[in-house]
Structures are given as structure tokens and as C-alpha cells.
Image (cartoon, helix red, strand yellow):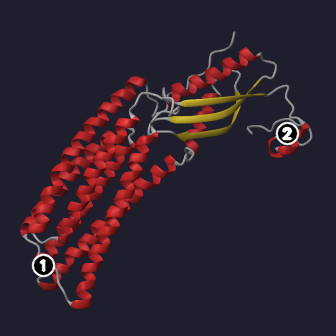
């Protein structure tokens, strides 16, 4: 009778099917609130920017229109990624669609930021070349900018909290967009105040504020882009997670030397693990299969119900590599005995 294995506490990202479904509902609620704010602000800011002669507020309104696009993208890709499990065309599930949505949001933020910076630089160039000053903004632009700061702060804290609770890349991308809106609206407040308090050349605070807005959008876009592209290109997980995998495997009676561990995220909540383990070379195929199955189940219990696990079994004793294998992969075996090296 085989001994019972030690139980390792579940990973903090481990989730059951019921929890995943609950997460999807929470994501949808957070998305709805975020969408409401994002749909209300752009027409107000655009109207105040045009009537109040504020280039910075118009730039911020364009940024908010980008938020609407981000909400639409998030809704589409959250809906796709929430599809249950896999189908014939997506055997690893649909989790990466959410990451694709994050990537599209990041790219749109980068393009918009560059365009805003370019337009503001043209305004400054017109002043230094021809002495043309922008118009002084009206007070309506100031009040709308202040209101935007307050609304976006509330939306950021709510969306980021829900992103952490549900481990959602798309909601985190939206939260980062909200906090960039806070900074950009703050820059608008400073720009409008400077333009109204300092006559004449003080109006140059407006395009300078717009440049700051564009720069913050670019910075946030890079912050969303980097983790999304790493996950989309199958970047490996961190060393702490790899060590957790080793720890779980070592609790399985009969399983030794977990090695060649390849782990990656195939969604915001789903981990894919491929690894080799060793067991006694005199075990029957049935016994070896039981060890492999128990290893797979232990990793799924630890990292979550949708974790994809592939285990390759190798004999540990008695075991010798063939001469042909030793010539092809000398780094994996002792050159004299042919025995596999420890933990390789």
C-alpha cells in the first residue's frame, strides 16, 4: 500500500470552476461600472474643451474616447475568454483572448499618446516660429477637469480592486488607463490654471499640459503592453512558481527529480505545466501511470482546476542512458556510467 502524500497548501491563484464563473460575473460588473464612467465623461470634456478653448482638455477628451474603445475591446474579449473550457479549435481554452484585448488597448494608448504629443508640439512650434499664442481657456474647462480627477480616482480604485480579486489582465489594463486619466486630468487642471493666472504667454501651459497628458498615456500603454506581450509570447513563469511546482511534485510518493519544467500562462488565470519526473525503473506501467496521474491532479489542486499538466515519466533506478543518447546529450548524463545527473 502506497503512503499518503504530504499536502501542499493551494497556490493563491488556484481556483475552482465555480470560482471562475463567479470571477466572470465580478469582471462583468466591474466592466459595467467602468463603462458607465467612460461613456459619460468624453462628451462633457469635449464640449467643455471646445467651448472653453482648452487644447489640453480636448486632448483629455480624446483620451476618454480611447477609454470607450478600450471598454468595447474589453467586453468583447472578456466574453470570448469566459467560454467554458476548450473546443476543437482551442484545445488550451480561450484565456489568451483576454490578453489579446489587453494588447490592443495598450497599442491604442500608445498611438493616441504619440498623436497628442505631436499635435501639442506643433502648437509650441507655431509660437516659437510665428509668435502665435493659444487662446486663454475658460473657467468651464477647469471645473470639468477637476470633476474628471475625482470621478477617475473612484473608478480606478474600484476597478483595480476587482482586477486583483479576479486576477483579470483586462480589468487591470482598464485600471491602469483610469489612473493615467487621473494624472492627465491633473495636468489639465495645472495647465488651465497657469493659462488663466498668467496673462499672455501663460497660455503655453495648455499645450505643455497636453504634452504631459500624451506622455502619461504612452507610459501607461507601455505598462499594459509589456506583461501582455510576455504572456502572449509564452514567457515562462517566475522562479518562485517553478519552485512551487517542484515542491508539489516532491510530495507525491514515488515521484522524484522534477526537471525540464516548462510553465507558462495560457490566460489570466490558467497555467500550463510540462515537466519530467523520475520513478523506480522496475515499476509496472500501471504503477508509473498512477504516479503520473497523481502528480497531474496534485498540480491541478494546487494551481487551479483549469491548469493544463503534461507529465513525462523516466526510470530512475536501475537506469542507464544508451551510448547514442550520451553522444547527443552529454550534458544530461554522467560520461562514465551513463547515469542521469541529479535534477537534470
Residue 159 seen in the current view: yes
Q: Quadrant of the N terminus?
A: top right
Q: Which residue is mark 2?
A: 325
Residue 81 at x, y percent in the picture: 40, 36
The residue drawn where x is 40% and y is 53% is 224
Residue 33 at x, y percent in the picture: 22, 41
Mark 1 is surrounded, within 10 Å at the Cα level, by few (under 14), some (14 to 19) or many (20 or more) other residues, namely some
Q: Quadrant of the C terminus?
A: top right
Q: Which mark is residue 135?
A: 1
Say which quarter of the image contains residue 164.
top left
**Extreme residue toward the front, this view:** 89
Residue 334 seen in the current view: no
**Number of dots carrying numbers:** 2
Which of the two discs, 1 and 2, labels the residue nearer the N terminus?
1
Residue 94 at x, y percent in the picture: 45, 35
Q: Is residue 193 left or right of residue 166?
A: left
The residue drawn where x is 11% and y is 77% is 136
Q: Is residue 41 above or below residue 338?
A: below
The residue drawn where x is 11% and y is 62% is 47
Amino acid at each position: 500500500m502506497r503512503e499518503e502524500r504530504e499536502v501542499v497548501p493551494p497556490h493563491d491563484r488556484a481556483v475552482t470552476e465555480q470560482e471562475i464563473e463567479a470571477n466572470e460575473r465580478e469582471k462583468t460588473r466591474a466592466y459595467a461600472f467602468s463603462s458607465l464612467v467612460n461613456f459619460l465623461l468624453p462628451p462633457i470634456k469635449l464640449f467643455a474643451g471646445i467651448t472653453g478653448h482648452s487644447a489640453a482638455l480636448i486632448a483629455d477628451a480624446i483620451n476618454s474616447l480611447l477609454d470607450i474603445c478600450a471598454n468595447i475591446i474589453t467586453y468583447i474579449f472578456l466574453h470570448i475568454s469566459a467560454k467554458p473550457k476548450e473546443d476543437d479549435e482551442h484545445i488550451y481554452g480561450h484565456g489568451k483572448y483576454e490578453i489579446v484585448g489587453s494588447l490592443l488597448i495598450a497599442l491604442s494608448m500608445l498611438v493616441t499618446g504619440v498623436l497628442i504629443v505631436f499635435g501639442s508640439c506643433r502648437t509650441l512650434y507655431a509660437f516659437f516660429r510665428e509668435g502665435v499664442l493659444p487662446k486663454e481657456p475658460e473657467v468651464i474647462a477647469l471645473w470639468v477637469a477637476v470633476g474628471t480627477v475625482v470621478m477617475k480616482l473612484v473608478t480606478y480604485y474600484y476597478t483595480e480592486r476587482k482586477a486583483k480579486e479576479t486576477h483579470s489582465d483586462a480589468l487591470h489594463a482598464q485600471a491602469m488607463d483610469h489612473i493615467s486619466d487621473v494624472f492627465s486630468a491633473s495636468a489639465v487642471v495645472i495647465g488651465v490654471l497657469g493659462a488663466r493666472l498668467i496673462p499672455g504667454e501663460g497660455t503655453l501651459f495648455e499645450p505643455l499640459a497636453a504634452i504631459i497628458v500624451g506622455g502619461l498615456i504612452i507610459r501607461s500603454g507601455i505598462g499594459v503592453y509589456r506583461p501582455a506581450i510576455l504572456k502572449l509570447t509564452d514567457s515562462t513563469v517566475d522562479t518562485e512558481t517553478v519552485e512551487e511546482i517542484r515542491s508539489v511534485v516532491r510530495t507525491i510518493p514515488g515521484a522524484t527529480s522534477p526537471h525540464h519544467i516548462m510553465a507558462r500562462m495560457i490566460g489570466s488565470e490558467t497555467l500550463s505545466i510540462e515537466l519530467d519526473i523520475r520513478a523506480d525503473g522496475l515499476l509496472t506501467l500501471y504503477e508509473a501511470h498512477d504516479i503520473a496521474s497523481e502528480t497531474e491532479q496534485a498540480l491541478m489542486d494546487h494551481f487551479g482546476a483549469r491548469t493544463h499538466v503534461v507529465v513525462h515519466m523516466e526510470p530512475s533506478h536501475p537506469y542507464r542512458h544508451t551510448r547514442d543518447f550520451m553522444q547527443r546529450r552529454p550534458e544530461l548524463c554522467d560520461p562514465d556510467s551513463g547515469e542521469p545527473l541529479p535534477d537534470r
